[in-house]
Amino acid sequence: MAALPIYVYGNDVLKKKAKALKEISNETIQLIQDMFETMHSSNGIGLAANQVGVLEQVLVVDLSEMEEYKDTKPMAVINPEIIDEEGEWEMEEGCLSLPELRDIITRSEKVTIKYHDANLREQKIEATGMLGRVLQHEIDHLNGILITDHLSAAKRTLLRSKLKKISKGDFEQKYPVVLPKEEKPKKKK
């Protein structure tokens, strides 16, 4: 397993819709393992393939470090689709691709998601709380949607200078990142 660099705001791959997987290859399994390693080494709880530069509908989630989710197994989710949602819930969110940026995001309180596991078996899950929120956040990534896309135009305007700093690498990072138009990942400090 290897920790991969995370693509930050301004990289085109973050605004593109990922392609559905039709089969699981050794490369897919390696990607999933590397994504778990990347997420853990970055202190994240979810990661979408777009964030490591791969346009495939793969995401990983691990909430087991949180007390209320200590019995929840890490999940690899392939080709997810939200098939039902209920209610609304506001909460502050951050994102590994938007370091040092956090804001209040409204998401569905409860979601039902159809997906495939790492063996390409179809699964269905009803998720609430943090699990539901993280799954929605990562599914957004797979559809080319960032948390900033949930904010009002006025709020995005207020964040413009902060977003520009992120795209230039002007932030304190704790993990390797890929800046827009950068050939080699920027090493962690």
Image (cartoon, rainbow, N blue to C red):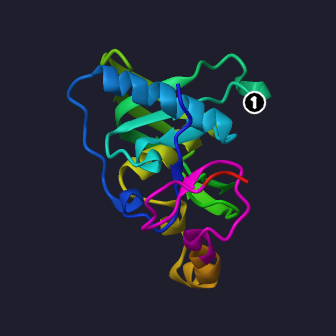
The amino acid type, in three-letter code, at marker 1 is Met
- Taking depth in this image into account, of 105 and 176 the one nearest to the observer is 176
The residue that mark 1 highlights is 66
Point out residue 168 in the picture as x, y percentages from the top left corner.
Answer: 57, 73
Q: Magenta segment, principal secondary structure?
A: loop
Tell me the magenta residue range. Answer: 165-186
**Residue sitting at x 32%, y 58%:** 16
Question: Furthest residue to the right?
Answer: 67
Question: Furthest residue to the front?
Answer: 184
- Can residue 30 be seen at all in this image of the molecule? yes
Q: Quadrant of residue 36?
A: top right
**Residue sitting at x 20%, y 28%:** 22
Secondary structure, mark 1, is loop
In this rendering, would 55 be left or right of 102?
Answer: left
Please tell me whether residue 99 belongs to the stretch shown in magenta.
no
- Taking depth in this image into account, of 55 and 68 the one nearest to the observer is 55
Point out residue 94 in the picture as x, y percentages from the top left corner.
Answer: 65, 55
Point out residue 159 in the picture as x, y percentages from the top left corner.
Answer: 62, 78
Figure quadrant of the C terminus = bottom right
Point out residue 31 in the picture as x, y percentages from the top left corner.
Answer: 41, 30
Q: For the image shown, how many numbered marks are present on the structure?
A: 1
Q: Quadrant of residue 154?
A: bottom right
Does residue 97 sit above or below 41 in this rendering?
Answer: below
- Taking depth in this image into account, of 111 and 51 the one nearest to the observer is 51
**Residue sitting at x 44%, y 51%:** 141
- Taking depth in this image into account, of 6 and 154 the one nearest to the observer is 6
- Can residue 155 be seen at all in this image of the molecule? no
